[in-house]
Amino acid sequence: MGAWWLPHLQTALKILFDGFKVLAMHSQNTKEGRVGSAGRQGRATFSVKFLTSSRGLLFAHLAWDIVEEAAHLSKVFQADFTTVTRAMAAVNNFRLRLMNMKETNGQRLQHFLNQIVGTNSFNEIFIVRSADDLKEFVTKKQKVLDDVLENLEQRFSYLEKDPVLKAAAVLDPDIWPADQMELSSYGEKRSKC
């Protein structure tokens, strides 16, 4: 049930930003030096445009933050011994983290913003910025997060609405009462569907 491709995307984004400076310089060299075939030069031109665009980099860092959180959720669903209550908690945790990203930036995005404050470069590579990039990004960020939250609700709403799954919550030992008397009758009323 988990998305097997999420860890691959997460790794790709990590590799992209770990080797950002080298990749940007190589693409710039290929583009300006007219090295390789026309197709290779075209890909290099596109890469340079993306890697030096503040808009593209802002979105890539936001995507990285979202993908990291989604990968945690995915791993819960891929685990061999996942319980319904653990899945429900993981979905709720993912929802809360996305909602938090609407108010504050994720770790990757904030790190990027801290690096470009007062400069037109990222990892010593000049980036193309306009005065409105950040303002436009904030609006788009809200829309992206709203779309992901809406998709999450559509995809996993059954976890909270299904009466059988709601009743299964009594099987979660993490929420069992500590008192032995309460525990002896715990769940009798809640497990009736």
Image: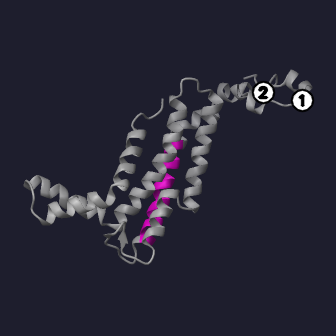
Q: Name the residue under label 1.
A: 179
Horizontally, residue 68 falls left or right of residue 8, namely right
Horizontally, residue 109 falls left or right of residue 181, namely left
Q: What amino acid is found at the position of numbered circle 2 in the picture?
A: Arg
**Mark 2 or mark 1, whichever is nearer to me:** 1
Residue in the image at 53% along x and 39% along y: 73
Tell me if residue 147 is in the magenta stretch: yes
Closer to the camera, 147 or 43?
43
Where does the magenta region start and end? Answer: 134-152
Above or below 142: residue 79? above
| Quarter of image, res 131 | bottom left
* Helix, strand or loop for disc 2: loop
State how far apart marks 2 and 1 are (Cα). Answer: 18 Å
Alpha-carbon neighbours of circle 1 within 10 Å: few (<14), some, or many (≥20)?
Answer: few
Q: What amino acid is found at the position of numbered circle 1 in the picture?
A: Asp
Most distant residue in the right direction: 181
Residue in the image at 41% along x and 33% along y: 4
Across and down, in percent, residue 146 comes to: 51, 54
**Badge number at residue 190:** 2
Closer to the camera, 51 or 151?
51
First of labels 2, 1 by sequence position: 1
| Quarter of image, res 164 | top right
